[in-house]
Image (cartoon, rainbow, N blue to C red):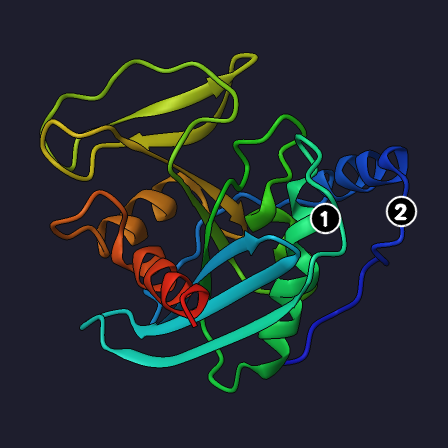
Amino acid sequence: MKYKKIHSFDLSKQEMVKIQKDLAKNLQIFPYGNCPKIVSGVDLSFQKNKALAVIVTLDYKNLTILDVTFAIDEVKFQYIPGLLAFRELPIFLKAWKKLEIEPDIVFFDGQGYAHPRRMGIASHASFFIEKPTIGIAKSKLIGNYQNPDYKKGEYTFLYHQDEKIGVVLRTKDNVKPVFISPGNWVDFNDTLVFTLNFVGKYRIPEITRQAHLYTQTLKQR
């Protein structure tokens, strides 16, 4: 799959922050307006000096795996809090270039709008791949919320500075919730409904859990 190169990655910290702020002005959080047919889940991992990105593509309706694409490369950037996307995007884009099945929506194991500058990996990546995106994070980065009830499928909203930035979703009875948020070109209801489609017997929804399983398999090679 092709992508649009919106900026380089040879940047200072100040330049990275400015890019995030500028891109955030162009986010569009609005209804998707349809039901996706093909979706992809992305997991990124780092091991010593290696970066690994896996994209698992599924049929939205029956959850059949249609394709698994991955890329491995040397780590180019060190981790900087709030700027994780600049470390993860280069390896993700290498995997994206190898992808041959075009998804309608892409889910990322990470934040979307629920980011200090509203520019988590899911939001940031959308400008490169020009696809609607959703972030599914295992932990909260910022914000305040009331705990959802302890039954699977219960949810509350995540807020930051009085703005709604995400959804706190219970994916399994009596288990810690996950934190989901729109990346771009979807809204909060889409984020919730589309993620619920992948909620099964595990805490992590299948769309990103499957990508994570492949990541762990590749790490053991």
Q: Earlier in the sequence, mark 1 or mark 2?
A: 2
Query: Badges 1 and 2: C-beta atoms under 8 Å apart?
Result: yes
Identify the amino acid type marked 1: Phe
Q: Is residue 204 visible?
A: yes
From what the image shows, is residue 147 above or below residue 112? above
Report x, y in % for residue 199: 20, 50
Q: Looking at the rendering, in which quadrant would you find the C terminus?
A: bottom left
Report x, y in % for residue 215: 42, 63
Q: Is residue 34 visible?
A: no
Q: Quadrant of residue 198?
A: bottom left
At 36% from the left edge and 32% from the top edge, which residue is drawn?
A: 167
Say left or right for 3 vs 213. Answer: right
Query: Total marks drawn?
Result: 2
The alpha-carbon separation of the residues under discs 1 and 2 comes to 9 Å
The label on residue 25 is none
At 26% from the left edge and 58% from the top edge, which residue is drawn?
A: 206
At 38% from the left edge and 61% from the top edge, which residue is drawn?
A: 216
The kind of secondary structure element at disc 1 is helix
Q: Nearer the viewer, residue 94 or 131?
A: 94
Q: Looking at the rendering, in which quadrant would you find the N terminus?
A: bottom right
Q: Which residue is mark 1?
A: 86
Q: Quadrant of residue 210?
A: bottom left
Report x, y in % for residue 47: 55, 54
The label on residue 11 is 2
Say left or right for 200 vs 166. Answer: left
At 70% from the left edge and 57% from the top edge, which residue is drawn?
A: 75
How crowded pointer 2 is (Cα within 10 Å; few <14, some 14-19, many 20+) is rated as few
The kind of secondary structure element at disc 2 is loop
